[in-house]
């Protein structure tokens, strides 16, 4: 049968049987007390999925709790019990879906099961983070791969799902969280080069600007003083725009942070604007320079606090 929500249920979930075969049979003699219809044990057992996916006072289902406790075999059994992938996307009161919890626990196998089963790969939690944001922040390459790798038909067959194959939702690699950061930004802030390499290979925008000040991954490498990250961006990311500017119009060399000579030279060779590369820039007043330095100091402090 099909419910109004669009959830497909098999006949085993909807079949009810009457215990008394004479119930409502007008040809039989009426008894003083008639037994009410009851569900058979088979139906009661089949309807257990409703209990499994019922939410508690915190909005958690058994699937949330099993993931949080690390009960891997229970998680697999619950995924197989789901009558439709929509039940795998239930958010709790913190807007955490099961895949958020699995990513936070760095349990890449559970994340992969959920993706193969048809769970949405990019839901937002209370901070606006997708599971990919969480994995990128943790430097968890295996979970990133579990989310982004294309699903193979054999994976789905092996999972033993009860419902037909559903269309898989496209992964948005450039989705912002509520801080205006993409997965590339959170990986760059934490200096996770392997994750960045993976994201870029799959097509994430290495030049994406975050939503508050317009910083790119390259800007973050300079702000953090991360020479390894800057070298990776300049040597491996062929689509990198070395002269990308913030919303204030500053390139990576114009942020006011010290830049190693080798990195500065590489930036200039890729077209990055120098701190005072034009006549108009030479005319910046001392007050403007002090203001930029103050704003950068505030940004660095906020960046450190957010990463703590």
Image (cartoon, rainbow, N blue to C red):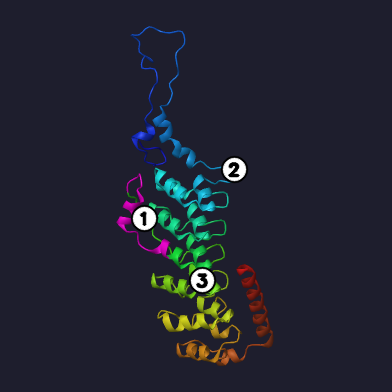
- Relative to 102, is 273 above or below? below
Q: In this view, does 201 lie to the left or right of 265?
A: left
Q: Is residue 287 magenta?
A: no
Which residues make up the magenta segment? 145-164
Picture quadrant where residue 301 is located: bottom right
Asked if one can make out residue 242 in the rendered structure from this viewpoint, the answer is no
Q: In this view, does 56 lie to the left or right of 132?
A: right
**Residue at image location 43% in from the left, 70% down from the top:** 199
Where's the N terminus, which quadrant? top left
Instruction: Check if mark 1's residue and mark 3's residue have beta carbons within 8 Å.
Output: no
**Element class at badge 1:** loop
Disc 2 to disc 3, C-alpha distance: 34 Å
Asked if one can make out residue 146 in the rendered structure from this viewpoint, the answer is yes
List the residue tagged with mark 2. Answer: 57
Q: Which residue is nearer to you in this view: 37 or 68?
A: 68
Disc 2 to disc 1, C-alpha distance: 31 Å
Q: Is residue 155 magenta?
A: yes
- Relative to 54, is 210 above or below? below
**Element class at badge 2:** loop
Locate residue 41, reporting x and y percent: 41, 29
**Element class at badge 3:** helix
List the residue tagged with mark 3. Answer: 187
Disc 3 residue crowd, few under 14, some 14–19, many 20+, Cα 10 Å: many
Disc 1 to disc 3, C-alpha distance: 25 Å
Locate residue 102, reporting x and y percent: 49, 56
- The image's mark for residue 168 is 1
- The image's mark for residue 205 is none
Where's the C terminus, which quadrant? bottom right
């Amino acid at each position: 049968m099909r419910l109004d929500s669009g959830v497909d249920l098999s006949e085993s979930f909807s079949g009810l049987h009457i215990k008394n075969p004479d119930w409502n049979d007008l040809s039989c003699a009426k008894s003083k007390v008639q037994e009410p219809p009851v569900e058979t044990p088979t139906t009661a057992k089949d309807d257990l999925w409703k209990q499994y996916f019922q939410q508690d006072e915190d909005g958690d289902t058994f699937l949330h709790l099993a993931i949080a406790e690390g009960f891997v075999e229970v998680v697999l059994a619950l995924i197989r019990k789901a009558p439709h992938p929509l039940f795998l996307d239930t958010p709790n009161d913190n807007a955490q879906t099961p895949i958020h919890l699995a990513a936070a626990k760095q349990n890449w196998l559970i994340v992969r099961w959920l993706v193969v089963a048809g769970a949405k790969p990019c839901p937002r939690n209370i901070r606006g983070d997708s599971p990919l944001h969480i994995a990128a922040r943790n430097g968890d390459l295996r979970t990133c791969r579990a989310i982004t790798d294309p699903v193979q038909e054999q994976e789905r067959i092996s999972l033993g799902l009860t419902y037909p194959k559903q269309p898989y939702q496209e992964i948005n690699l450039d989705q912002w969280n509520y801080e205006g950061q993409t997965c590339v930004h959170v990986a760059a802030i934490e200096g996770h080069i392997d994750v960045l390499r993976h994201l870029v290979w799959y097509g994430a925008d290495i030049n994406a600007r975050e939503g508050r000040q317009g910083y790119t991954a390259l800007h973050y490498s300079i702000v953090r003083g991360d020479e390894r990250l800057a070298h990776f961006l300049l040597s491996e990311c062929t689509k990198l725009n070395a002269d990308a500017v913030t919303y204030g119009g500053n390139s990576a060399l114009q942020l006011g942070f010290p830049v190693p000579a080798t990195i500065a030279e590489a930036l200039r060779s890729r077209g990055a604007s120098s701190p005072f590369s034009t006549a108009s820039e030479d005319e910046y007043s001392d007050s403007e320079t002090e203001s930029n330095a103050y704003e950068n100091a505030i940004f660095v402090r906020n960046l450190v606090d957010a990463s703590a």
